Image (cartoon, grey):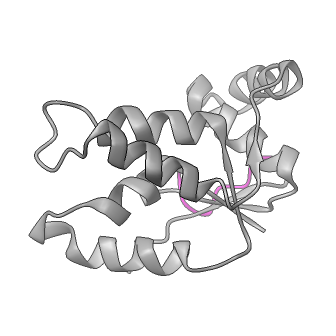
Amino acid sequence: MRFVDTTVLLYAISTADSEAEKRRRANAVLDDADLGLSVQVLQEFYVQATRPGRDDAITHEQAVGLVEALCRFPVQEITVGVMTAALGTRGRFGIPYWDAAVVEAARALGCAVVLSEDLSPETDYGGVRVENPFAT
């Protein structure tokens, strides 16, 4: 199973012409059944997708519908265990806490790969490897 980071979800709804290829790739990723997400990723998606300054912002109702649809995938909750592990990963690898929380949510779901444009591609965080689905 692969874990999907927030940027994949945001590119999937982008209407920007300059992001057409990333939109196509993001939607191809989301066509797979073997994916996982976290509550954090869904929260970040909602906040960024509905942000008033975003050129292609969606409505609250649209975002809620998408979040509900994305719950068809396994979703890792924010737990004390995930948070504590993320603090350790942040200290061990020197990455921002929120990125470490993504890595640890992926690990908690049993995902060996995180699909992310934000984390360093091909980096292995103690058994969870990052792949950039938009790299050419």
Percent of width and height locating residue 69? 55, 58
Percent of width and height locating residue 26? 43, 71
Towards the viewer: 75 or 103: 75
**Magenta span: helix, strand or loop, mainly?**
loop
Query: Where, by quadrant of the figure, is residue 76 drawn?
Result: top right
Residue at x-position 46% and y-position 54%: 66
Residue 122 within the magenta-colored segment of the rendering:
yes
Q: Is residue 76 visible?
A: yes
Image quarter where the C terminus lies is: bottom left
Percent of width and height locating residue 33? 69, 76
Residue at x-position 24% and y-position 46%: 58
Percent of width and height locating residue 51? 24, 32
Determine whether 93 is above or below 2 in the image. above
Residue 3 within the magenta-colored segment of the rendering:
no
Residue at x-position 31% and y-position 42%: 49
Lateral position of residue 119 relative to residue 10, left or right:
right
Lateral position of residue 88 relative to residue 90, left or right:
right
Image quarter where the N terminus lies is: bottom right
The segment highlighted magenta reads 120-126
Towards the viewer: 72 or 92: 72
Towards the viewer: 136 or 83: 83
Q: Is residue 135 visible?
A: no
Residue at x-position 82% and y-position 24%: 79
Q: How many marks?
A: 0
Lateral position of residue 51 relative to residue 35, left or right:
left
